[in-house]
Image: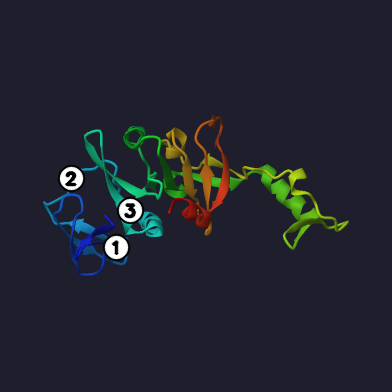
């Protein structure tokens, strides 16, 4: 886990520290090496309650939990006579689950059934075994736009005439990206989930949104996608 109770406060791991697990209330100690993300661990033979929703801590999880802070990360949810940990709970009580590795259909189904409709995923594309790339339509449009128009003082202007173009009369593709499976074996979460997905695809300031439903499965697996600025995402959900 990335957070434990330290001096009465939910805190990230720091070197040479002992804390209390917020779940089982047992003592945990910090692991702050140079290879793995800094985290808290239970003493040998004093493990916490088993939670099939939990994965080993990673730098991907650490990054996203730090975006939201300790108060919104690793939240216990009591429901249906069970207790599970939500990676993040947004300001509107939406559950955000983080995944950067393979995951079975059964666990996907269990997580979505437990948290219900008010949840979505943020995942690491590389860990899930697929890639995001720009559509041919978007590439063609971008080249056409670059060759034909300029942007001056916030207006779209024709290079040849200098006239301002009415944005409402221009075709602006809503979806600029599609995804395709890049590794063999095992389904990716994106192929089987019934929830919306946001993909951390390595773009520094953006993530890619994959809406649920209307998926096509052929020679390659495609899904209409669109970019979302991370700052806008955080403003909406933090």
For the residues carrying marks 2 and 3, which lies nearer the camera in this image?
Answer: 3
Q: Position of residue 143 (x, y in %)?
A: 74, 52
Q: Which residue is mark 1?
A: 38
For the residues carrying marks 2 and 1, which lies nearer the camera in this image?
Answer: 2
> N-terminal of the two: label 1 or label 3?
1
> N-terminal of the two: label 2 or label 1?
1
**Circle 3 Cα neighbour tier, 10 Å, few/some/many (<14 / 14–19 / ≥20):** many
Determine whether, in the image, residue 161 is placed left or right of residue 187.
Answer: right
Determine whether, in the image, residue 2 is placed left or right of residue 172.
Answer: left
Which residue: 69% across, 48% down?
A: 139
Q: Quadrant of residue 180?
A: top right
Look at the numbered disc 1 and give the secondary structure of its residue. loop
Residue farthest along the left direction in this orientation: 45
Which residue: 52% across, 59% down?
A: 204
Give the Cα separation between the discs numbered 2 and 3: 18 Å
Relative height, residue 163 to residue 16 (above, below): above
> N-terminal of the two: label 2 or label 3?
2
Q: Which mark is residue 73?
A: 3
Q: Position of residue 19 (x, y in %)?
A: 18, 62
Q: Which mark is residue 49?
A: 2
Determine whether, in the image, residue 113 is placed left or right of residue 9.
Answer: right
Residue farthest along the front direction in this orientation: 92
Give the Cα separation between the discs numbered 2 and 1: 21 Å
Look at the numbered disc 3 and give the secondary structure of its residue. strand
Camera sees residue 203? no
Give the Cα separation between the discs numbered 1 and 3: 15 Å
């Amino acid at each position: 886990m990335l957070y434990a109770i330290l001096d009465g406060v939910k805190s990230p791991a720091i070197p040479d520290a002992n804390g209390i697990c917020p779940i089982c209330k047992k003592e945990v100690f910090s692991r702050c090496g140079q290879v793995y993300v800094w985290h808290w661990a239970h003493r040998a033979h004093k493990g916490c309650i088993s939670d099939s929703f939990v994965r080993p801590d990673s730098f991907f999880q650490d990054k996203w939990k730090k975006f939201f802070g300790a108060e919104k990360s690793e939240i216990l949810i009591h429901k249906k006579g069970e207790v599970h940990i939500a990676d993040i709970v947004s300001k509107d009580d939406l559950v955000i689950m983080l995944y950067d590795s393979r995951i079975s259909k059964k666990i996907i189904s269990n997580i979505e059934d437990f948290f219900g409709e008010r949840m979505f995923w943020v995942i690491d594309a590389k860990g899930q075994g697929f890639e995001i790339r720009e559509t041919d339509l978007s590439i063609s449009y971008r080249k056409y736009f670059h060759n034909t128009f300029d942007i001056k003082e916030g207006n779209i202007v024709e290079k040849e005439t200098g006239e301002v173009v009415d944005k409402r009369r221009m075709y602006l593709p809503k979806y600029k990206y599609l995804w395709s499976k890049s590794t063999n074996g095992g389904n990716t979460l994106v192929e089987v989930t019934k929830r919306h997905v946001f993909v951390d695809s390595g773009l520094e300031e953006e993530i890619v949104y994959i809406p649920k439903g209307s998926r096509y499965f052929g020679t390659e697996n495609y899904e209409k996608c669109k970019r979302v600025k991370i700052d806008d995402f955080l403003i909406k959900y933090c």
